[in-house]
């Protein structure tokens, strides 16, 4: 199933305690979120892939951002 996910840029804290720019991607169906450092399309793609792997409902959805891309 194709599911829309929302992307938000945020300041995240890395393992060393430093603030870094990143993205938070949220499934619009269940509100599950994933985070990734960086703000490029690669970071968003990583979060979309993690949403698929971590789905709390064990669904194997195909996640897309607004406009149906990435």
Image (cartoon, rainbow, N blue to C red):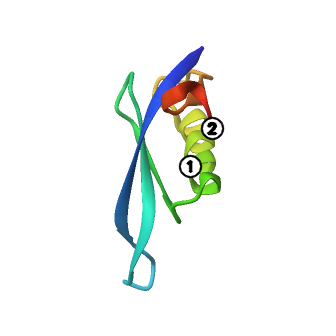
Q: Which residue is mark 2?
A: 70
Which image quadrant is residue 18 in? bottom left
Q: Earlier in the sequence, mark 2 or mark 1?
A: 1
- Picture quarter with the N terminus: top right
Q: Residue at x 43, y 69 (%)?
A: 21
Q: Nearer the viewer, residue 23 or 33?
A: 23
The local secondary structure at tag 2 comes to loop
Height in image: 10 above or below 60? Answer: below
The local secondary structure at tag 1 comes to helix
Height in image: 40 above or below 13? Answer: above
Q: Is residue 35 left or right of residue 30?
A: right
Cα distance in 3D space between marks 2 and 1? 7 Å
Residue 25 horizontal/vertical position (percent) = 44, 44
Q: Residue at x 38, y 26 (%)?
A: 28
Residue 43 horizontal/vertical position (percent) = 58, 56
- Picture quarter with the C terminus: top right
Q: Nearer the viewer, residue 22 or 18?
A: 22
Q: Look at the numbered discs 2 and 1 and tell me whether their residues touch, using CB distance below 8 Å.
A: yes
Q: Residues within 10 Å of mark 2 (few under 14, many from 20)?
A: few
Residue 19 horizontal/vertical position (percent) = 36, 78
Q: Which residue is mark 1?
A: 44
Q: Residue at x 48, y 30 (%)?
A: 66
Q: Residues within 10 Å of mark 1 (few under 14, many from 20)?
A: many
Q: Residue at x 58, y 18 (%)?
A: 2
Height in image: 38 above or below 7? Answer: below
């Amino acid at each position: 199933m194709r599911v829309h996910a929302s992307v938000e840029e945020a300041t995240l804290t890395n393992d060393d305690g430093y603030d870094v720019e990143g993205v938070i991607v949220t499934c619009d169906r269940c509100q599950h979120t994933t985070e990734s450092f960086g703000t490029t399309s690669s970071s968003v793609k990583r979060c979309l892939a993690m949403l698929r792997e971590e789905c709390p409902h064990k669904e194997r959805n195909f996640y897309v951002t607004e406009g149906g891309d990435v």
